[in-house]
Amino acid sequence: MGYRRTKGGRVGVKRILFMAAMTARRTDSPLKVFYENLINRGKKKMVALTALMRKIVIIGNAKLKSLHT
């Protein structure tokens, strides 16, 4: 079974998310725990980092939604 490739999307946003994910995996935070759990379950590092990027987007969207309600 292979892994999917990510393509398309907004390059600038993806760069920012990548850097945010790289920082989050090094800091003492729940996001680091999330990343390490994925690695411990056998996910490749890049796959876990991409999942972390998605998690950051979900958290950001939830915060924006709570500001507007």
Image (cartoon, rainbow, N blue to C red):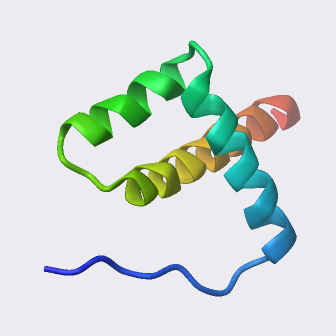
Image quadrant where one finds the N terminus: bottom left
Q: Which of 64 and 60 is in front in this view?
A: 60
x, y percent for residue 60? 72, 40
Which of the 4 image quadrants contains residue 7?
Answer: bottom right
Asked if residue 22 is positioned above or below residue 67 in the image, the reply reads below
x, y percent for residue 43? 26, 52
Direction from residue 8 to residue 4 in the image, left or right: left
Image quadrant where one finds the C terminus: top right
x, y percent for residue 47? 40, 59
Label tally = 0
x, y percent for residue 53? 59, 51
Q: Residue at position x 76%, y 39% from top? A: 65
Asked if residue 46 is positioned above or below residue 41 in the image, the reply reads below
Q: Residue at position x 40%, y 50% from top? A: 48
| Residue with the most extreme left position | 1
Q: Which of 43 and 65 is in front in this view?
A: 43
Direction from residue 41 to residue 3 in the image, left or right: right
Q: Residue at position x 78%, y 62% from top? A: 15
| Residue with the most extreme top position | 28
Which of the 4 image quadrants contains residue 66?
Answer: top right
Asked if residue 13 is positioned above or below residue 66 in the image, the reply reads below
